[in-house]
Image: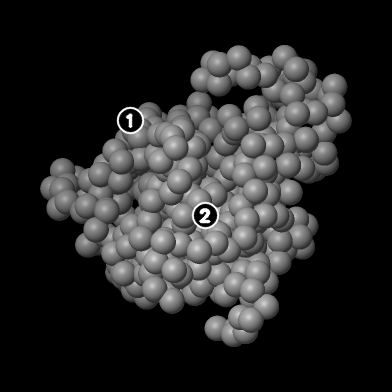
Amino acid sequence: MNKLYVWATNTVKKQTACQYYRIHVPLRALETLGYALCYNADGLDTQKDIRAMLTSDVCLLYSLGGEGILHQVEVIKGMRPAPRGDNKIHYPAVTVYDVDDNTDFVHPLNYAYLHLGIRHYPSGELLVPGENLEIEWEGQFDEDGKPLRQITWVDKETKLDQWGDLTFDIARNLHQMKIRHRIIKTCDGATTSSPVLKSYFEEVIGQKNVYFFPNTVIVGDYEHYDVVRHDTNVRIFWQGAVAHYVDWFPLKEALRTINQKYSNLTWVLYGSKFGWVTEAIPDERIEYYPWSDYDSYKLRRGLLNIDINLCPLANNAFNQCKSAIKWYEASLWDNPEATLAANVAPYLEIKEGKTGMLYNTPDDFVEKLSILIENAQLRKTLGENAKKWVYQNRVPEKTIPGLIDFYKELKDEQRARLDPKVTLVKR
C-alpha cells in the first residue's frame, strides 16, 4: 500500500494541549516519517474540506459529538468503492474516533461540565433531569462547622460567560452522551491515550477495534534555555486548572509540613492558584504564572528551571483515563526534572525509585518529597532515567509505526468487507 491520506477534524479553533497531542503531533509525525499525507480541516466549513474528507483513506474525528457527526459517519460507512480517473478503485475512508479523556465522567469543576456533565460526584451516579448538582468542598466548612456543600449546577439555569447562551441541561447532556457512544461504536475504529480508556471503549461502549496510541512528544517543540539562577533554592513545580482542586487539596497539610521543614524552597505554580495554597505556603515563597495559550506554555515551561515536578491525582474514573504527559514533559529538558506522582493510573508507567517516585498517602508524599529535596543526586538520576524512558517509548519514531499499522489494518478489514475477492491478512 502506498502512503495513506489521513484527514482530521475537530471543532475547536484555538489549539489546546489536547488538540496539540492528539491531532497536530500525530499528523505532523505521520508526514515527517513518510507514512502519510495529512489534512487538518479544523471543521467542515468549506467544500474543499468535504472533498478532502471524501477522498481520504482515514477520517480522524477528534472528540466530536452530535447528530450531525453521527450522520456523517453513517454516510461514510455506507459508501462503496468507486473507480478513480487512473482506473484504480478508490475505497471510502475508514472512520477513526480519537479522544484523550473519558468525557462520560467529566468533573463538576471542569467548565466543560456545562455541556458534558451527567453524573454526581464522587459517586458517579447518573443525574436525573430536574436535579441540581451539589458538591462538597473538601476542607471548607460553613458557619456551623459542617463541611461546606454548594449547589454548583442547576438544571436548565446555570450558564457560563465563556459559553454564551448555552445552559446546563441534564436531559440534553444525557442524550448527547448516547449519540457520542453511537458515533464511537459506528466508527471503524478508535484510538485512545490510555489503556484504561481503551478498555472503557471496548467493554462499555462496544467499539472492538481500539488502539492505545500514547501521547507523543516531539522533543524539538520544547525549547530549553540555560536560565541563570539567582538563588540556590529547590524549585518545585505544580500546574493545573480549577478541576484539579480535588487532586491538589488533600495535600494541603503535607505542603504546610514540607514548607515548615525546609527554608530553601520555591513553589512554582502554573494555572490555578487556590486560596488555600497561601494558607499552607507563604505568598513570598510562591512563584505564580497564570494560565496561558499552549504555545506560550511550551515556551515558558523551558524557562522555569524546575528541580521537582509534582503530579498529584485523585483516583477517580475521569483521572484514570488520563495520560502521563506531565511526566513526559518534565523529562525532556537538558536537565530533566525528578517527578513525584500519585500512585494511580496514568502514572503507573513510572518505575518507583528508577524513573520517578510514587506516593500513596499525604504522609508518603511528605516522606518522598523530603528525600527528593535533600538528595540532589537522586533527583538527577531519576530525571535522566525518565528522559531515557521517554526517548525510548514516547517519541514519534517509537509510537507512529504502531498507529500507521492500525490504520492499515482497518483499511485491510474494510477491503475484505467490501470486496469478497480480497483476502484479509492480519498484520
Q: Which residue is mark 1?
A: 284
The quadrant in which residue 210 appears is: bottom right
Viewer-proximal residue among 267 and 24: 24
Residue 88 can be seen in this image: yes
x, y percentage for residue 350? Answer: 49, 68
The secondary structure type at the circle numbered 1 is: helix
Disc number for residue 154: none
Q: How many labels were placed on the picture?
A: 2
Q: Residues within 10 Å of mark 1 (few under 14, many from 20)?
A: few
Q: Which residue is mark 2?
A: 59
Quadrant for the N terminus, please. Answer: bottom left
The secondary structure type at the circle numbered 2 is: strand
Residue 374 can be seen in this image: no
Contact (CB < 8 A) between labels 2 and 1? no
- Of callouts 2 and 1, the N-terminal one: 2
x, y percentage for residue 164? Answer: 56, 16
Q: Is residue 33 placed above or below 268 in the rendered structure?
A: below
x, y percentage for residue 340? Answer: 46, 58
Viewer-proximal residue among 271 and 172: 172
Q: How is the image coloured?
A: one colour
Residue type at mark 2? Cys
| Residue at point 55%, 70% (across, down) | 411
| Residue at point 75%, 55% (across, down) | 205
Q: CA distance from mark 2 to mark 1?
A: 51 Å
Q: Is residue 218 placed above or below 241 in the rendered structure?
A: below
Viewer-proximal residue among 54 and 131: 54
Quadrant for the C terminus, please. Answer: bottom right
